[in-house]
Image (cartoon, helix red, strand yellow):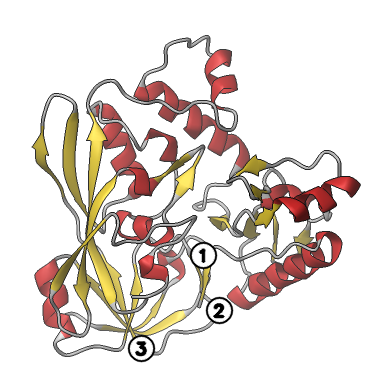
Amino acid sequence: MNIRNNISLKNYNTFGISVNAKRFISVNSVYQLQQLLKIEKDIFLISGGSNMLLTKDIENLVVHIDIKGISIDKEDDSSVYITVNSGENWHELVLWCVSNNYGGVENLSLIPGNVGTCPIQNIGAYGIEVKDTISKVEALEIETGKLISFSNVECNFGYRNSIFKNEVKGKYIITSVSFKLTKDAHQLNTSYGAIDVELASKNIKNPTLKDVSNAVIAIRKSKLPDPKELGNSGSFFKNPVVSKAQFIEVQKEYTTIPSYSVSDTEIKIPAGWLIEQAGFKGKRFGNCGVHEKQALVLVNYGNATGSEIYELAKKIQNTILHKFGIILEIEVNVI
């Protein structure tokens, strides 16, 4: 096995944070990973590096998951079941699905990262969550090296949450994700966000999967920075969910506050709106800042450390708590 020493992780995280891995190895098969786990247990996993903020050098062995491959397990006239290995790029998978007329993930276009991390965070955008298409997740148990299959229910999915962020965190390595997608009678979701507006601007009245995907890509590109050009990890904070009573109290002072009903007793508030109202949108703080078009995104202007970005995040959290009485949770994993 080719373990390398003192490797910079700058190109392995979308924030572009320059920290070092004392030891580093890239694996491209489940077998290779199993062999590695026989001799190494104290490991740090990295895949697309899209949902992490690195604040220090990594002392334990950094294992880059680079397992590729897509297979069709079975299909009928209406559905197709596919299994995708964890090292595949998420957006490239979405484009592949759209090109094959497989529906269900088109609203999740242009989300950064790899397939293996999508169930951990239960990624979502524009009214869709990945849990709605996942049939099972296969993962390697670090302690035993055995492959374990988790059904959709066993993944215990929640809003930006799953069993892999909680009960079994650090115990498994996701090796593949299986999806059930539609082949016809696609249930398109175009009402969330600006998708309908984007489609109307193109005079599209009966959109295809590709039309919806293109609309989402256009919207995201207009609002979100490309990590290759400006280091970021997408949405840094979760949209807070508060009680109706708390929302009504905040609404008394901020009458234009946007909201989305989650249940009969809970309301979701866009974190970006809160951050913008607090005056952070477009502001730069040394080598980092808040993006000028989307306040939910923290950015690295080139030489920021992870600690600098984390300090900015805490400053935003404290300001929102003081101004609105609302707790902002960080969505990104801070290491």
Indicate the secondary structure of the residue bearing disc 3: loop
Of label 3 and label 2, which has the lower sequence position? 2
- Rounded to the nearest angstrom, the CA distance separating label 1 from label 2 is 11 Å
Residue nearest the observer in this picture, 2 or 85: 85
Which residue appears at 43% of the width and 25% of the height?
Answer: 212
> In the image, residue 3 lies at what x, y percent?
23, 83
What is the three-letter code of the residue carrying label 1? Answer: Gly
On residue 60, the disc is: 3
Query: What residue lies at 9% left-to-right and 71% top-to-bottom?
Result: 31
Quote the CA–CA distance across marks 3 and 1: 20 Å
Q: Mark 3 to mark 2: distance in Å?
A: 15 Å
Precedes in sequence: disc 3 or disc 1? 1
Relative to the observer, which residue lies in front, 28 or 111?
A: 111
Q: Is residue 17 above or below residue 79?
A: below
**Residue 193: which quarter of the image?**
top right
Q: Viewed as shown, does residue 168 lie left or right of 310?
A: left
Q: Position of residue 93 (x, y in %)?
A: 29, 42
Outermost residue on the right side: it is 253
x%, y% of residue 318? 78, 70
Mark toward the viewer: 1 or 2: 2
User: Who's the residue at 22% across and 81% down the image?
Assistant: 142
Residue 282 visible, this angle:
no
Which disc, if any, is residue 189?
none
What residue did someone put label 1 on? Answer: 16
In what quadrant of the picture does the N terminus appear?
Answer: bottom left
Q: Which mark is residue 55?
A: 2
